[in-house]
Image (cartoon, coloured by chain):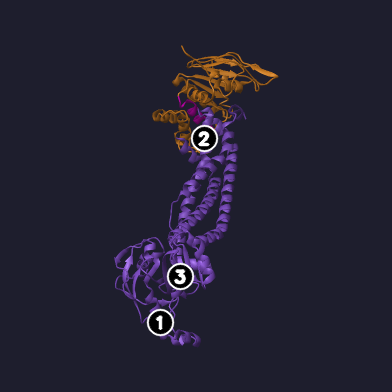
């Protein structure tokens, strides 16, 4: 079975004095993985390495069998746009656009065409139909986090990454967000990796990687 | 959502700074464009009316005034010259053709010009209806005279003494009859009423007897004498370039007439106007420069606000070049919108000025789209790109990982 993600002995350093050495991570297709660790242990760095936002000093990152550390420039951006969906700690959107336009932008930037049925179903299952034509500054934190989940899955990626997706949410919204994230990942048969220090999440996951500082 | 639609949403999302950028740019373009339009139209009109005339001979005075009154019929004549002396001069072998003009009266502000039948040929004047004048007190009128005054074939009218419509000294006893109307030529011919020279002389002989009481004793004595035949100007074409060298000097030195070269005087006029045109061009250039600066600063400022948005665009699949294009396109949009508004405003101003000059000087300004517009458009695009290039490069170099971790 094809794996969503395999990382092989990746290392990264911001300066000469300290190098992060990360454990190898394997995420099967449709598998849900939790990466935990204290602040400053490199959780976000690991996520950015997997997403190809930074290039590791050493090692390889295979997504759907392709080593993204070998991709450069526009090719890397396009690969990321199509194969990886990312949910950030604080949801960020393009302020001049409405919720729907933000999602469509994520599609058109990758030269794909909008699947309207899928778009409708996303608004419905994530319970943000009422926000469809609102600007993002008119939406609540919970709604924004659900919209960012929609954006992460709009291009049907093979890997979904979430960076502290619940840190700004209350218990109810936190549970809801994780439930939706896992539901969407399952539906797409995509790998899901959640990076967090939020202990509320631990009980639900069978596979957990703990990063040591 | 394509990049152009996105661009307009971005511009609309910051209405104040966008409007300021566009207003500044449009103001600059309007002034530059209007200055060039006026200059082109004016020079074009002047050159067309010059009709290849080499030399204008008239009474002594300002040479520019002589040109303006003799060829363009805008200023007042410098005075009259003796007809016989003028005829004598035109026999000079260096002269190919000489056309006499006798001014003095007008109808509703349109000048009545006593001349010969060669005069309309300078402007390729063709008859629209009727025929050229044949007898005394018959006139052929320009197309604009016909349309503005409503004069038609067979209609009679009385000339008014002087060259402006304000005078109330009407030659009622000897009316003119319209025998023909010229086709529109786009030249000064359109605004003239042509007749033979004898009519102009006769009308003034009569008039002087009619209105004795208006004239001083001295004048009357002179007039009751021999009535010297006079004309206002003589238009001259040289036989060969030698004419240009000897004729003006000959006339200015050895007669009490004055010779003025249209080319020289027009160049003098252009260089006088040129100072003003240059000043206006610099001022408008400066405004465009300020608007470029304003575009530059507003783009740079918006980059700070939009840093996260730009990083986001990279994360969801946009390339570095896409970010570059987004920012450049914004600069170009301001320039194009500003240019279009400036283009329209300058034409509206032209329309307004044209109707003003038409009503006040019987001069129509022409030429709505010129080569300069193309040049201005290209320059606008370049300014838009230059103003946006540094912000665009900065956007392209955004470090996404760092921005997202902040």
Instruction: Determine the chain carrying the residue at label 1.
Output: B
Asked if disc 2 and disc 3 are in contact, CB closer than 8 Å, the reply is no
Residue tagged by mark 1? B205
Q: Is residue B24 left or right of residue B111?
A: right
Foreground label between 2 and 3? 3
Start-end of magenta stretch: A140-155
* Vertical placement of residue A191 versus B327, above or below: above
Residues packed near mark 2 inside 10 Å, few (<14), some (14 to 19) or many (20 plus): many
Distance CA(mark 3)–CA(mark 1) = 25 Å
Foreground label between 3 and 1? 3
**Element assignment for label 3:** helix
Residue A119, x across and y down, in percent: 42, 30
Residue tagged by mark 3? B89
Distance CA(mark 1)–CA(mark 2) = 80 Å
Residue at left offset 58%, top offset 25%? A164
Q: Quadrant of residue A41?
A: top right
Examine the structure image and report whether residue B249 is included in the region drawn in magenta. Answer: no
Chain A colour in the picture? orange
Query: Which labelled disc corresponds to residue A25?
Result: none
Foreground label between 1 and 2? 1
Residue tagged by mark 2? B325
Residues packed near mark 3 inside 10 Å, few (<14), some (14 to 19) or many (20 plus): some
Chain B colour in the picture? purple
């Amino acid at each position: 079975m094809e794996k969503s993600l395999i990382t092989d002995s990746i290392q990264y350093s911001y300066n000469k004095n300290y190098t992060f050495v990360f454990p190898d991570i394997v995420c099967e297709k449709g598998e849900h993985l939790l990466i935990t660790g204290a602040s400053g242990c490199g959780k976000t760095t690991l996520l950015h390495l997997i997403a190809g936002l930074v290039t590791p000093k050493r090692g390889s990152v295979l997504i759907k069998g392709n080593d993204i550390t070998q991709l450069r420039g526009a090719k890397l951006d396009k690969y990321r746009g199509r194969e990886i969906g990312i949910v950030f700690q604080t949801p960020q959107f393009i302020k001049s656009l409405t919720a729907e336009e933000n999602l469509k932008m994520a599609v058109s930037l990758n030269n794909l065409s909008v699947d309207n049925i899928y778009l409708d179903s996303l608004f419905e299952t994530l319970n943000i139909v009422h926000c469809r034509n609102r600007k993002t500054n008119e939406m609540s934190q919970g709604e924004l986090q659900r919209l960012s989940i929609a954006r992460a899955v709009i291009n049907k990626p093979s890997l979904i990454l979430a960076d502290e997706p619940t840190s700004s949410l209350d218990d109810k919204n936190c549970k809801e967000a994780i439930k939706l994230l896992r539901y969407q990942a399952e539906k797409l048969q995509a790998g899901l990796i959640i990076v967090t220090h939020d202990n509320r999440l631990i009980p639900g996951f069978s596979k957990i990687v703990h990063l040591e500082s | 959502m394509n990049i152009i639609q996105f661009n307009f949403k971005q511009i609309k999302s910051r209405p104040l700074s966008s409007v300021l950028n566009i207003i500044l740019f449009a103001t600059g373009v309007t002034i530059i464009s209007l200055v060039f339009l006026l200059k082109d139209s004016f020079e074009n009109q002047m050159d067309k009316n010059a009709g290849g005339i080499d030399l204008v001979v008239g009474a002594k005075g300002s040479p520019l005034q002589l040109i303006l009154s003799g060829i363009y019929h805008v200023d007042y004549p410098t005075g009259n010259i003796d007809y016989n002396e003028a005829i004598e001069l035109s026999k000079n072998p260096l002269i190919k053709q000489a056309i006499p003009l006798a001014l003095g009266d007008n109808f509703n502000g349109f000048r009545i010009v006593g001349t010969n039948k060669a005069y309309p040929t300078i402007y390729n004047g063709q008859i629209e209806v009727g025929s050229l004048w044949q007898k005394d007190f018959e006139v052929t009128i320009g197309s604009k005279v016909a349309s503005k005054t409503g004069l038609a074939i067979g209609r009679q009218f009385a000339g008014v003494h002087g060259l402006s419509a304000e005078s109330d000294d009407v030659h009622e006893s000897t009316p003119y009859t319209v025998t023909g109307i010229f086709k529109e030529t786009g030249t000064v011919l359109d605004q003239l009423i042509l007749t033979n020279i004898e009519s102009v002389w006769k009308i003034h002989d009569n008039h002087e007897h009619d209105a004795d009481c208006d004239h001083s004793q001295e004048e009357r004595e002179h007039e009751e004498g021999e009535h010297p035949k006079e004309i206002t100007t003589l238009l001259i074409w040289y036989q060969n370039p030698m004419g240009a060298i000897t004729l003006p000097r000959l006339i200015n030195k050895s007669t009490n007439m004055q010779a003025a070269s249209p080319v020289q005087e027009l160049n003098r006029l252009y260089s006088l106007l040129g100072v003003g045109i240059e000043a206006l061009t610099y001022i408008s250039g400066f405004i465009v420069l300020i608007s470029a600066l304003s575009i530059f600063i507003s783009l740079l400022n918006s980059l700070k606000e939009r840093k996260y948005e730009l990083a986001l665009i990279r994360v969801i699949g946009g390339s570095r070049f896409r970010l570059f294009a987004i920012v450049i396109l914004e600069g170009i949009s301001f320039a194009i919108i500003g240019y279009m508004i400036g283009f329209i405003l300058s034409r509206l101003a032209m329309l307004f000025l044209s109707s003003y000059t038409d009503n006040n000087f019987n001069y129509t300004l022409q030429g709505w789209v010129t080569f300069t517009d193309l040049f201005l458009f290209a320059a606008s695009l370049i300014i838009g790109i230059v103003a946006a290039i540094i912000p665009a490069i900065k956007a392209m170099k955004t470090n996404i990982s760092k921005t997202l971790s902040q």
